[in-house]
Amino acid sequence: MDDGSPEAARSILGDHKIIGGTANTLSDVLQRMNEPCDYIGLGPLRFTATKEKLSPVLGFEGYRQIVEILKEKSLSVPKIFAIGSITLEDIVPYNRLEFMELPFQEKLPDSRPLLMNLKK
């Protein structure tokens, strides 16, 4: 599936809409950082059946490596959202990765009590 370019989306939607770009590799992230994206959907975290041609699975370690390289290059870490089979159990590990964001994170500033209640 071709989503089109962030530049094309920005020219159609203007500056008052939120536009994201998808990334799977450090190279993809660097490209998205130079485009008019408000956030980057990075993944997949793990295998997902929702895509026919799935990019290589990153796992938590893949996210860490990409962000560490950005920091080593003295680049600002962009707003990154995890994609690819994210589950409720991922909330706590993601909260430990200070650079990561989940789409619902702002609604759940401290997700640990919620997660514990859901597991009861």
Image: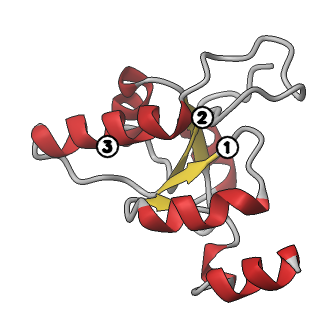
Please state which of residues 107 and 117 is positioned toward the viewer in this rendering: 117
Which residue is under mark 1? 83
Residue 3 in the image: above or below residue 63: above
Residue 115 in the image: above or below residue 1: below
Which circle's residue, 1 or 3, is located before the other in the chain? Answer: 3
- Marks 3 and 2, how far apart at CA: 13 Å
- Marks 1 and 3, how far apart at CA: 15 Å
Q: Residue at x 77, y 62 (%)?
A: 88
Q: Residue at x 77, y 41 (%)?
A: 85
Secondary structure found at label 3: helix
Secondary structure found at label 1: loop
Give how far across and how far down residue 20 sits, in percent: 60, 48
Residue 37 in the image: above or below residue 45: below
Q: Amino acid at mark 3?
A: Val
Do the residues bearing badges 3 and 2 touch, measured as CB atoms within 8 Å? no
Q: Amino acid at mark 2?
A: Gly
Say the numbered circle drawn on residue 43: 2
Which residue is under mark 3? 67
Do the residues bearing badges 1 and 2 touch, measured as CB atoms within 8 Å? yes
Which circle's residue, 1 or 2, is located before the other in the chain? Answer: 2
Q: Amino acid at mark 1?
A: Ile
Identify the image quadrant of the N terminus: top right
Residue at the extreme front: 120
Give how far across and how far down residue 18 sits, in percent: 62, 61
Mark 2 Cα shell of 10 Å, populated few (<14), some (14-19), many (≥20): many
